[in-house]
Image: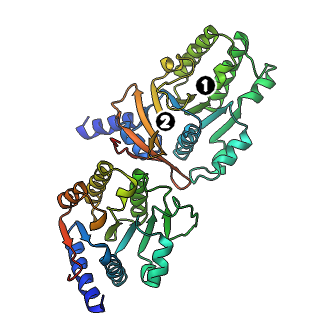
Amino acid sequence: MSDGIVISEEKTTEENVVCKTGIDELDLQLDGGIPVGNTVLVVGSSGSGKTTMCMQFLANGARQGERGVFFTITEPLFKLTKNMQGFNFYDKKLIESGMINLIDLRIISERLGLDTEKYTVEDASALLEVLKDIADELNVKRLVIDSITALCYRLQTKEMIRDFIFKLGSSLAAMNCTTFLTSEVPPNEVKYSQYDIEEFIADGIIFLGDVDRSGDLIRTLQLIKMRGTTHSRIKSAMSISSKNGIELTPLLKSRA
Amino acid sequence: MTNTLIDGLKERVSNAITINQSVGVILPGNNYSDLIQALFEHIKSNHEDVWVYVTITRPYETIVKQFGDICCGGNIKFIDCISRAAGLSKVDTNCIFIESPAHLEKIIMEIMGVFKDMGDKVQKYLLIDSLSSLLIYNDAQLVTEFFTHLINITRLKDIHSAAIAIEEEMNDNINKMIYLRSDKIIKLRESFI
């Protein structure tokens, strides 16, 4: 085998193991992208851009031929699609063609006959099985659960939450699709999850925050961890616009 | 100022910005309007070049009113950093309105976004009007970092830049920085060019 062929094979393998978010600066910070199969916690307070980032991640994947699924438990589907319509990355055809599948977990719960506000251990297991079945059936490469916090809120004890989180982690690892789990935290707190356990099943953590500059809030993004890749840990300023979705640039370090 | 003097100013700035990658223009407030007029005339007469004009000194609408057609050629895009902070919420295809002049990173992102849309085949120019006005909204350290970062990016992307600084608004830090970072300094005096 010549050297040229060896390089070509390595390149193909390299391309297959990285899942590009499609957000150029973020992929650059990730040394190419997220290792395929990683579960990433997208952490932030209300309005920090978690859902937008997840939808952009799915839309960019769908354009590369990677099917995705978005499980929501925080907002109804009509509201989710309405909010996304303003973004250029959003294309209704990606949903109509089945490249992006939007699923309301509350509706699934209702169909399973579960109490949508409170889950028992059995309910949680049943829901997990359904999530797995849907992901397998659709053969998705990208999966989003928005939010893991709202899902855990429906579990009654810390033990149940811990058990559910670990089972979810094992299921996601077996699926070999790249997953974003959104995690809601209070504003201005350096905390990655509500229940202090979600981060332990995550291979990566993307923290979305704010810095106050003369009373204005500047959105920020920081990669806290990402297993399987050398990544940047700089704090970036983040912008969300209808034209480009999420964009990043290095944050200027004010001493004020 | 007479037309002859504006022409002289235009020639001086035109030559400097064509030859040098980054030019700093330091001037007294009284000469400001003449300099802007000279710059617009230069931009209009070099229609194959593309410009991004970042205004922190006057709202876009005021510039259009004052300079009329001369500032609205097809080869110039504006980034207005002050109108929205003043409560104006106009939409104009030729101008991007930034929420706050304190959001310096957003200014950088928008500048680079506009240049990206312009493609690679054109000669690109950036005008910051003015660096000293940013001091009204930001601390000097931050403005220094912003300018350094901007100069680094524009050099990497082969974009020529001109940064205006008004003497009355300047402090020692900005003065030092503009001298250090610019390839060429043009210092204007009230009495002569």
Quarter in which the N terminus of chain B is drawn = bottom left
Lateral position of residue A64 relative to residue A84, left or right: left
Identify residue type, mark 1: Ile
Mark in the foreground, 1 or 2: 2
Q: Which mark is residue B10?
A: none
Q: Quadrant of residue B111?
A: bottom left
Quadrant containing the C terminus of chain B is bottom left
Q: Tell me: B162 left or right of B54.
A: left
What is the x, y in percent for residue A119?
A: 73, 16
Residue found 58% across the figure and 39% down from its top: A47
Q: Position of residue B57 (x, y in %)?
A: 40, 67
Badge number at residue A148: 1
Circle 2 sits in a helix, a strand or a loop, which is it?
A: strand
- Callout 1: SS: helix
Q: CA distance from mark 1 to mark 2?
A: 16 Å
Which chain is disc 2 placed on?
Answer: A
Q: Residue at x 68, y 14 (%)?
A: A125
Task: Decide: is B15 above or below B84.
Answer: below
Asked if B188 appears above or below A81 in the picture, the reply is below
Rendering coords of residue A181 (x, y %): 56, 28
Label 1 packing within 10 angstroms: few (<14), some (14-19), many (20+): many
Residue position for label 2: A208
Q: Is residue A96 visible?
A: no
Q: Is residue A104 left or right of residue A145?
A: right
In this picture, residue A71 sits left or right of residue A242: right
Q: Is residue A147 visible?
A: yes
Amino acid at pointer 2: Leu
Q: Output the chain of dot 1.
A: A
Residue B170 percent location from the top left of the image: 27, 61
